[in-house]
Image (cartoon, helix red, strand yellow):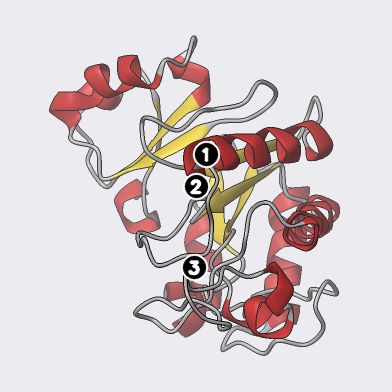
Amino acid sequence: KDLETDLQGVYDKIKTLSPDVPVMLDMKSIYGNFFYSSKVCGDRKSSIDPTAMDAMIADLSSRGYYLIACLPAFRDYYFGLNQTSNGLFVSSGAYLWADGDYCYWLDPTKDGTISYLTALVTELKNLGFDEVLFDEFRFPDTDNLRFSGDRAQTIANTASLLVRSCSTDNFAVSFVGQETFSLPEGRTRLYLKDAQAAQAAAIAQQTGIADPSIHLVFLTENHDTRFNDYSVLRPLEAAH
């Protein structure tokens, strides 16, 4: 919401941080509104001036900041509405399943879904980002879906495909998930939300990640020293 209400204020605060501090920016809403000048799916207006966002990204990239673009992956109202064949349908019926926010969800197995996400990653990489972080990289929490496959394995397969096709030696494709998320091989990281500092070590062990100090990131406002053995990203106000 800070980007929507005070983009210049956010920009000014970021510039007070050292360039060795990673900066993560939300780049698309769950409804499919882009916060930058995207050409992937045409004009989807948002309350953020995309030209101003483009200029901020270009400037921060030129200053040497490590930039992370965060966007919801399979939760996208507009793409589901306009590309219904790539959406998740209710278990009995010919209409798309929608969540409590009236958002449609995309089928991770569909070529159209994968092409869409791949195009977004390519676009954001060309814009100057060093990493793309997929949030909502999961199935919705419901049994009312027309999908009979193994959900966890499907998510793992799609994650592996995106990392293989989009990551490079200097560009990462990462995911927000649970500690049970199957992180693929390659330049990628697992981001965890809402972890308790007292459980940080146990959670890191549960992930099975060989080098959690590199491939595991906690998203938290907490400055507890028990997070110090891992990578941590905090909201802008907490970072200050």
Residue at the extreme front: 92
Give how far across and how far down residue 151 sits, in percent.
50, 44
Q: Can residue 83 be seen in this view?
A: yes
Q: In which quarter of the image is the N terminus?
A: bottom left
Judge left or right: residue 137 versus residue 218: right
Q: Which residue type does callout 2 highlight?
A: Leu
Q: Which residue type does callout 1 highlight?
A: Val
Label 2 belongs to which residue? 17
Q: Can residue 15 be seen in this view?
A: no
Residue at (36% x, 46% y) in the render: 234
Point out the frontmost of discs 3 and 2: 3
Label 3 belongs to which residue? 10
Q: In which quarter of the image is residue 29?
A: bottom right
Q: Distance between the residues labelled 3 and 1?
A: 15 Å
Give how far across and how far down residue 53 sits, in percent.
68, 72
Judge left or right: residue 14 versus residue 36: left
Contact, mark 2 vs mark 1 (Cβ under 8 Å): yes
Count of marks placed on residues: 3
Q: Measured along the vertical axis of the image, is residue 146 above or below residue 31? A: above
Q: Measured along the vertical axis of the image, is residue 32 above or below residue 105? A: below
Residue at (75% x, 70% y) in the render: 54
Q: Which residue type does callout 3 highlight?
A: Val
Q: How far apart are marks 3 and 2 (CA)?
A: 11 Å
Contact, mark 3 vs mark 2 (Cβ under 8 Å): no
Residue at (39% x, 22% y) in the render: 207
Nearest the viewer among 197 and 109 is: 109
Label 1 belongs to which residue? 21
At numbered mark 3, what does the secondary structure look like: helix, strand or loop?
Answer: helix
